[in-house]
Amino acid sequence: MRGRVATAAMALLLLVGGCASEPGPQSTAVGPSPVTAGPSLVTAGPEVRAATGDAARRAAEVTAAWPGSAAQQAWEHGYFPVEDTTEWMPAGAFRSGADKAAYLSGHLDLGTTLPVSVSGTAEVRFADGSRLTLPQRSAKEVFARLTARSDVCATHCDSRLTVTAVRPGTTTVATSRGQATVPVWEFTLSGYDRPFRYPAVLSQAPAAGPTANTFDGSSTVLDSVSADGLVVTAVVSYGSCDTVRPGEVHETDLAVVLIGRVDRAPARACDAAARSTPVEFRLSRPLGARTVLGLADGRPQLPLGRLGRLGHLG
């Protein structure tokens, strides 16, 4: 495997390998803590904790579905962004609430001619020099999507924006194969110096399927991989009265699934604040080129590069 969210620092962190490290300290657990307390690391200890229970069965399903799947092909050989590529706003975004309301409600007028592609294709260029030709998303399609928006306009409903210029451009996107330069359409709006940008090619990542939640483990978000590839650290979410235990792993030759273990608190007065903590998972052999897959959604993950970036639990 080769390497807003997920970040540029993700690239190549999965290309690690090496020999076994010295046994680490015994496993630890994190229990209820004050709201102001920072995350405490749950260490892996020297032993490999193999998956158990319903979570083990779910992890086996996830890893069995990965080889040869459309997701694997896109992840390893296609264009699979690991950040939001819906649009790129200029710094500061909107000048006023009226402009924002007009934009979100699709109140845009076309005051220029939309460019037309002759070939109908566009090229994605990866940092390693490889290139990928994909169908081009036309400027006409982008404009149609913008004007089809139907967000409820509470105020400034009569405000409108005018597109004064549309030009081709490029931007850099973090993908499963590392940084990539991708084509965009740059829309200039009246009164704005910097353009609003939209992708001229679409992700090849399959749409997310239904998320399974009928298992006894907790989902995790991959954060980092040790230098020897034997210990991966992931973020686990838990409630204010819960206790986070050392996690478990399910491994195959091609993929790894991390399973968080959280002891839910008995019925008692607990605040509703969600918490998260880093948890180490020890593997039986270096991660190497294997892909880390989400327990619930089966989707591939790259290291976030720093703890606490939640909202991507899979």
Image (spheres, rainbow, N blue to C red):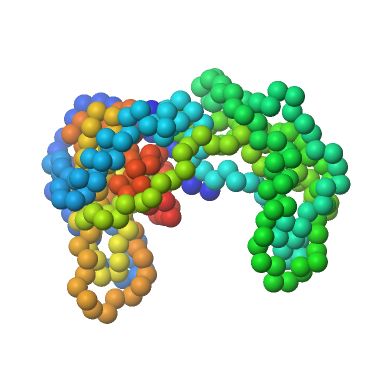
Q: Is residue 241 above or below residue 251?
A: below
Q: Is residue 1 left or right of residue 249?
A: right
Q: Is residue 115 left or right of residue 153?
A: right
Instruction: Compare residues 40 and 143 and report the one nearer the observer.
Output: 143
Task: Locate residue 278, reporting x and y percent.
Answer: 31, 52
Task: Locate residue 53, reporting x and y percent.
Answer: 15, 50
* The residue positioned farthest toward the bottom in the image shown: 269
Q: Is residue 14 visible?
A: yes
* Quarter holding residue 284: top left
Task: Locate residue 107, reporting x and y percent.
Answer: 76, 58
The structure residue drawn at horizontal position 43% and vertical position 55%, both measured from the top left corner, is 311
Task: Locate residue 20, reporting x and y percent.
Answer: 19, 30
Q: Is residue 306 left or right of residue 140?
A: left
* Quarter holding residue 184: top right
The structure residue drawn at horizontal position 71% and vertical position 60%, both measured from the top left corner, is 105
Q: Is residue 169 above or below residue 118?
A: below
Q: Is residue 3 visible?
A: no
Quadrant containing the N terminus in the rendered view: top left
Instruction: Compare residues 231 and 66 and report the one nearer the observer.
Output: 66
Instruction: Compare residues 241 and 23 and report the one nearer the observer.
Output: 241
Instruction: Compare residues 33 and 117 and report the one nearer the observer.
Output: 117
Q: Is residue 12 left or right of residue 65?
A: right
The structure residue drawn at horizontal position 66% and vertical position 66%, both measured from the top left corner, is 152
